[in-house]
Amino acid sequence: MTGVAKKTVMRLLVEVGDVCADYQDKVFQNLNCRRLQLDEMWGYIHTREPNLNEGDPEEWGSTMIWLAIDSETKLLISHHIGTRNGVNAHAFVCDLRKRTEGRYQVTSDQYNGYVGAMREHFGQNVDFGQLHKIYGRINTDGWYGGGQVIGAVPHVKIGRPDWSRISTSHIERANLSVRMHLRRLTRLTNAFSKKLSNLEAAVTLYVAFYNFCRGHQTHKGGSPAMAAGLTDHVWSIAELLGAA
């Protein structure tokens, strides 16, 4: 399609992903928020977990894409890639805290690793709640996916969050957008990432595109970056690459 070798294109995408990450690190500082939502979505690198063999690279297998969204501006403030454990929960929350200021409300799912991470990096200067979803079984033959949600129970962990705002609906909708746009994260795909660096670059590129170049219905076609006061118009891809 391009007349350029595939490996050349892949190297370029990784380089562009790196500079987009650097640009957002510089711009996403001292952000004022009122309500944030956190979540993780599953993916894998090179090989699914059951098919791993002894001696395979450590980066292969299942991983998680951690995302934080501002419920009002829909800005994806922070993202992180790593397995679902306490170390990555702390790295993700630490990055989020560095980009924001002041006290605000945060909601996550019931993963316990968030609790310690929030206490370490936010202390008591946060209103933090978790939403515990209760799943039922689906008996349909051949069903591929999670169970049906039959209940959701909010839990207060730190401070005094608004119970009516303990929700993960916005970040879960953002997760759907990620899966719809990034082929390597589509379920049952054959376009999975072969290297961790490729997945990191692809996710970073999408996050930058989503924040600066993609119009959002909530903002009548404006981008999340416009709603957050980071720019005054929806960027083209060329503008994004130029800024990065």
Image (tube, rainbow, N blue to C red):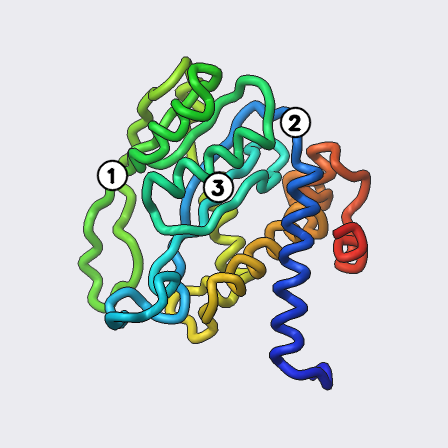
Residue drawn where x is 45% and y is 45% of the image: 66
SS under mark 1 = strand
Q: Is residue 186 above or below residue 119?
A: below
Residue drawn where x is 58% and y is 18% of the image: 102
Disc 3 residue type? Answer: Ile
Find the distance from the CA under tag 1 to the CA under tag 2: 36 Å
Nearer to me, 35 or 242: 242
Residue 202: which quarter of the image?
bottom right
Q: Is residue 114 left or right of residue 181?
A: left
**Callout 1: 10 Å neighbours few (<14), some, many (20+)?**
few
Q: Is residue 110 above or below residue 173?
A: above
**Callout 3: 10 Å neighbours few (<14), some, many (20+)?**
many
For marks 1 and 2 on the same chain, the one whose residue lies earlier in the sequence: 2
Q: Which of marks 3 and 2 is in front?
A: 2
Q: Please state the horizontal and vertical placement of residue 112, each as a whole percent of the image.
A: 29, 34
Disc 2 residue type? Answer: Asn
SS under mark 2 = loop
Disc 1 residue type? Answer: Ile
SS under mark 3 = helix
Q: In this view, does 20 lie above or below 11?
A: above
Residue 228: which quarter of the image?
top right
Residues tagged 3 and 2 counted as in contact (Cβ below 8 A):
no
Residue at which label 1 appears: 134
Q: Which mark is residue 30?
A: 2
Nearer to me, 102 or 161: 102
Q: Which mark is residue 171?
A: 3
